[in-house]
Amino acid sequence: MSRGENVVGVDVGGTFTDLFLFDAATGTARVGKVPSTRGREADGFAEGITGLAPLADISAIVHGTTVGTNALLERKGARAGLITTAGFRDVLEMRRRDRRQTWGLTGTFVPVIERDMRVEVAERTLADGSILTAVDPAEVRAAAQRLLDAGAEALCIVFLHSYANPANERAALEAVRTIWPNAHIAISSDILPEIREFERTSTAALNAVLQPVVGGYIAALDATLRQGGFGGAFLIVQSNGGVMSVETAARLPVRTALSGPAAGVIAAAHIATEAGFPDVITGDIGGTSFDVSLVAGGVPALAAQSTLDFGLVVRTPMIEITTIGAGGGSIARVDAAGLLQVGPQSAGSIPGPVCYGAGGDRPTVTDANVVLGRINAERPIGGKFARLDAAAAARVIARDVGAPLRLDVVAAAEAILRVANARMAGALRLVSIERGHDPKKFTLMPFGGGGALHAGALIRDVGLARALVPRFPGVTSALGCVIADMRHDRVRTLNRMLAELDPAALRAEMDAAASSLAALLNRAGMAFTARRVAHALDMNYAGQTHTVAVPLPLEPDGSGELSQARIAAAFEAAYSGSYGRLLPGVPMRVLNLRSAVTGVRPKIDLLSMAPTADASIESARRGRRRVWFDGWTDTPVFGRLGLPVGAVIAGPAVLEQPDTTILIEPGLSGRVDRFGNLILEASR
Amino acid sequence: MLDPVTLAVLKGRLEQIADEMDATLFRAAFNPTIAEAHDACHGIYDAATGATLIQGKSGLPIFVGVMAFGVRAVIDKFTGDNAPAEGDVFIFNDPYLGGTHLSDLRLVRPCFRDGRLFCWLASVGHWHDVGGAVPGNYNPAATEYFQEGVLIPPVRLITAGRLNQDILDILLAASRMPMSAYGDLNAHLSALDLGAARVAALLDEYGTEMVAAALGELTARAAAQIRAEIAALPDGTWHEEDFLDNDGRTDVPLRIACAVTVSGDRLKLDFTGSADACAGPVNISRATTVASVYVALKHLFPEVAANSGVLDPIDIVLPPNALLDAQRPKPVGGYTETILRIIDVLFCAFARIRPDHAYGNAYGTINALSIAGLRPDGQRWVMFSFFGGGHGGNPEGDGLSHGNPPIATAIIPPVEIMEAAYPIRFTQWALRPGSGGAGTHRGGMGAIYEIELRDSSAEAFVFAERARFAPRGVLGGGSGAPNVVSFEQDDGWHTPPLASKVVGVRLKRGQHIRLESPGGGGWGDPAGRDPAAVARDKRLGYVP
């Protein structure tokens, strides 16, 4: 390949952009980190890549992004409109008639598309797919014009029962195309052709508010990269942990809702399993958020749908990730009741923490770490700043936290970390203890720039066995981008009794789905080590409303014999596995066909990144500095990447590396394994 | 002595067992009231007393309180030679023993360890139909339980692992929807199988003694927590009352009165002054009354753990012959309306005891609608669902629009699922503008649901409340809009004579029935509302 075999993974977080370059020809990797330039992300992105290799020498760029997540959580999506069936404009706001929490009747809900931007048109499809009232194109155009006049930048069209027959939605789409000034229009049967109107409407509405945001973002990136001479494939990580083309991402941005975090979990599962710890809880501490995910037996948990916040439902397969607003940039403040709060407000990367000296004027978690000596103010990570302004950080902490709580500056900084750690520990408990997993059996894998500073406190608080700090924790999500497989999914509603299902017709459906999904793989221009085709049916006993996913027993390429008897046997196996008792004699129904095509990408041999043979503890020493652990302690500092395999460092100690700082608290010690991971455990 | 981390782990593991049982039943059940609306519950109960030890997070809150009575009924009946054995499963729906109403089938299974009873598991769910005069069993005109459905006393459904086919045959014969009943029954049994296997695995892992110690500790902690909450309240007695529209037979309001007395760390709830037992189906049994108090307290003190410890420092006084202590054969099918009113009364009392935590009343009715007919092939169909309304304004903000009732976490079945299952079509599914009570923080809006019949003929029934007495506001907030039920006949639209209750109205093809559900009560003086919020209400059409 003339461009070489360089694949770059890029993870743009709220504060830093992390990069990971893997050169398949030589088996070597390089990492990079630059500050994110919010609002002008393309600049930081291109700058970061060219720091590793010329754009023209790169064969593929794979990107995990939190642009979509942030827009939804901060309610900064685009102004979008919804056109829907007469009588049903409030479906989005009425939800499934639920409430925020079981106990205590507080909490309200604001939909992403407000009531005045939801317009009804006369049309009606029935449950059997027959059309009771055809849609009137002129009425739809008039509705769309009203929404345009009201400032809509995106439009979604959601009609009742469109999963059964999309004709009215398609006719409406055709009618609107002629007047809609941009590509941000979609119909629900294209996004999610599945029964249940609220889940379909919510997914379509979130997609619409994201289209201008994510679409514009990706187009700007693409243009900048191409201008810089990039000629390879540009791919985006999906929430399910697979990658997709930028065209698909711009059309279905709702699939990026957990893109960045999903890439991190993919990498974490790979690294931890290789290191011999297949049961891990990942904790990604970025600038604005803390993302937690549980990996049991090396396999990340997948959820069929996800609720990003109360009533914000996305129905598309995703890696199960729990997010709270606590990160390095989280702002500390004392509220009206005199209680110290940390987050969810964040200083982000612009202006960022006070110590960056970039205009930030509110104390953050990072400022507290600087004041306590845990972050080296003279040699900050990321490389953007020559030094950090510890005095300014101390001044603001004293003013905003110390004075109101009558604490000295050190005690105030410590209090900020205690509150931040308690919030993060709560998120770890939520995914482990509260779901019946014993934390003693799990390893915490902190990543993101700030994770390794808090790992010791978190394993102690939650009772986890140990922490594993990967060799390049700041770029874990970027590494995940490089190793994630390409995956495309498709669902089609069949809704037939098994006894009436023609296996030959089903086989034709499956082959058609597989070949159209394979075409998406081919268009991406990537090399795959293998391809896999999987088909599953959503089935139930006639009369039930929920279905069980029935994987069809087929070859890895999707071929294999199909018959009603084989499908029935597969259903019974799946059903008894999930529910227990079979119901002999009750007829079976096939609701949906789900097809997935995976292009398997080369995995990185992590040993290629291990410390070299000439490394030694002595040569890794970088002197000592004062760090606060219940008192100022003269603490040895090491260059982490210089530590040899097998090294054991007892706390207190600080390990520094370009993308993160690791704190080994008193009572803990860190051991370097053969891959260069640091295993943090209680000292014996 | 248990360390706090192990206790927290075991609490999570035990709750996970109940949650997984919930999930198994929801997914495997046939009838949408369980599968979609989650009108079901699972828990782990004390071997000797039946007291609730562990409750799932996804089950129906009101069942949390009554299940202890259900397990107790089995404990009391099966003794001596007839004592429960490994592999037995009991079933019943007797509301006078177990609370709520005949629609709720309870399955109870003992868990043994080393030959001794360790705990009970129970699975309860609202079945589609259990016979009686009205399909779906919400019979507003019932005067005895015989008109509400078939009563099953506690009996062995499974003896030492062997199904008693005779009992199954009786259960299926009693229902208009035998296939649905068969599916639901198997789903309950699958949930109990799973629960028993999970409990056994947990005992293997942690040992019987440690799990038993954790269960005891969790109940003790809940009791200590609720005592501390009550001790923080000012001592004194507060009187509150509210009314049910009628009993479904005669249009006379029924008073629910309560004197709430705080005395140190104990709470006395004296319902003297409440109406006597009535002819119609809004009576409730003592078990149900106790359960509704539990639900109210859990909403008022959400931090307290969900187990029987919550009721430890509570004294409940019921007058003789009360509506709230009904004896057989008084009908109890509409129990939901009465317990919602008890909760409203307690919320209003606590708004005065603790104004900084006051909630306006939620919509206060279950809004049960059933429509039943015959398909061309002679098969019966019964569409049955509960409909939502507004929550009350509260210190944090406006009330939630279109929420579920405080006694349930049930979600509503999708329109598309209902239309696929039954010959009906929704012609409207919308928020009800202007229905939220005025206030500094407005009540949430109720909804408008309008349904058209697409079959040649069917009968409709509505069991609802709050058409005459609207949900009240607190601290100067206004009332939510009252419930409005209407239906179409050849000569036009009608409202039922008993306001909120409809008994067997015949609809023809193309005719509609319409529910306009109540909004929640407001919180605080409406004059204090932020002008920007007033303008937004206007712009979005929340207030006409």
Image (tube, coloured by chain):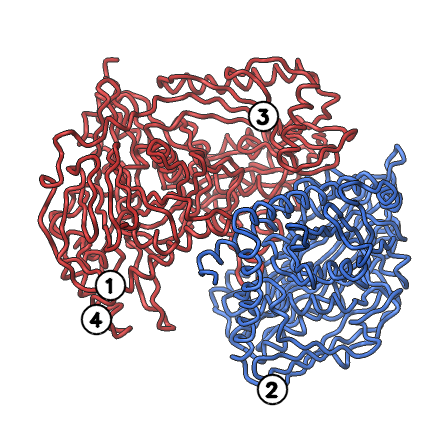
| Marks 1 & 3 on one chain | yes
Q: Chain of mark 2?
A: B
Is the residue marked by circle 4 packed among few (<14), some (14-19), or many (20+) residues within 10 Å? some
> Tags 1 and 3 in contact by the CB under 8 Å rule?
no
Residue at the spot of label 4: A408
Q: Tell me residue A675's x, y (percent).
A: 26, 32
Chain A shade: red
Quick one: SS at disc 1?
A: helix
Q: Amino acid at mark 2?
A: Gly
Q: How many marks?
A: 4
Q: Tell me residue A206's x, y (percent).
A: 48, 42
Quick one: SS at disc 2?
A: strand
Which label number is shown at residue B236?
2
Chain B shade: blue
Residue A396 occupies quadrant: bottom left
Q: Amino acid at mark 3?
A: Pro
Residue B355 occupies quadrant: bottom right
Q: Tell me residue A348's x, y (percent).
A: 28, 51
- Report the Cα–Cα distance between label 3 and label 2: 63 Å
Quick one: SS at disc 4?
A: loop
- N-terminal of the two: label 3 or label 4? 4
